[in-house]
Amino acid sequence: MKGGIYLLLGGNLGNVVDYFLAAERSAQNYFKVLRKSSLYQSEPWAMESENLFINQVWEIDTHLNPKSLLETALLIEKDLGRVRKQDSSTYEDRVLDIDILLYRNQVISESDLQLPHPRMHERAFTLIPLLELDKHLRSPSDNSLYQDHLLALSDQERQSVKIMAQ
């Protein structure tokens, strides 16, 4: 089965687009990027920062299982300069963040990995680029349409996400 695995890339420090390209080069031995959404810019979410975020969703194909994909994503982040605080309960500025949004139709609830991503339905900066790639995607948890989750967000939340480039 090809595709059906979606990653969200984000960052707000340095040349974020260059970090995305470097991440793709670093990942070549682990996964293949099948499709990429446009680049989107948005205000920081659940944190204070003067730096706008850039986000992009990738649909990938990989031989890695979800846990190994998570480990690979964390390694790529670290190799490209991401430094994580010990206290992960607060958000902070970052050069690169890679989140697994969906891994086909798998539902996983473990301390270090939750699929689908537990907060993706609350975030326009996640849903808009994801739905650009597949507007009919449904949550494997409850079969709800992600399009409906996006429409449930406020107009202000949806309008805060601006397309940068395709």
Image: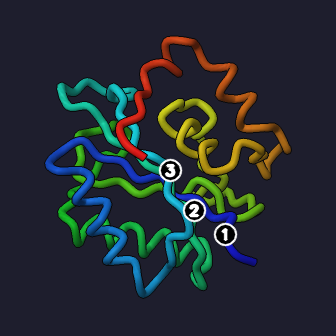
Q: Element under label 2?
A: strand
Q: Residue at x 52, y 40 (%)?
A: 126
Q: How far is the residue under mark 3 from the one under mark 2?
A: 9 Å
Q: Residue at x 35, y 34 (%)?
A: 41
- Residue 108 lies left or right of residue 97; in this view the side is right
**Depth order, front residue of 150/163:** 163
Q: State which tag comes first along the sequence, 3 or 1.
A: 1
| Residue at the disc numbered 2 | 59
Mark whose residue sits in front, 3 or 2: 3
Total labels: the figure holds: 3
**Depth order, front residue of 92/76:** 76
Farthest right residue in view: 143
Tell me the crowding category of disc 1: few under 14, some 14 to 19, or many 20 or more residues within 10 angstroms, Cα based.
Answer: some
Question: How far from the left and from the top, in percent, is residue 77?
Answer: 30, 64
Q: Quadrant of the N terminus?
A: bottom right
Quadrant of residue 28 within the rendered picture: bottom left
Q: How far is the residue under mark 1 from the one under mark 2?
A: 6 Å
Question: How far from the left and from the top, in percent, is residue 144?
Answer: 82, 38
Q: Are marks 1 and 2 in contact (CB under 8 Å)?
A: yes
Q: State which tag comes first along the sequence, 1 or 2.
A: 1
| Residue at the disc numbered 1 | 3
Q: Is residue 106 above or below residue 128?
A: below
Q: Are marks 3 and 2 in contact (CB under 8 Å)?
A: no
| Residue at the disc numbered 3 | 37
Q: State which tag comes first along the sequence, 3 or 2.
A: 3
Q: How far is the residue under mark 3 from the one under mark 1?
A: 14 Å
Question: How far from the left and from the top, in percent, is residue 102?
Answer: 64, 57
Q: Residue at x 31, y 37 (%)?
A: 53
Tell me the crowding category of disc 3: few under 14, some 14 to 19, or many 20 or more residues within 10 angstroms, Cα based.
Answer: many
Q: Residue at x 32, y 76 (%)?
A: 25
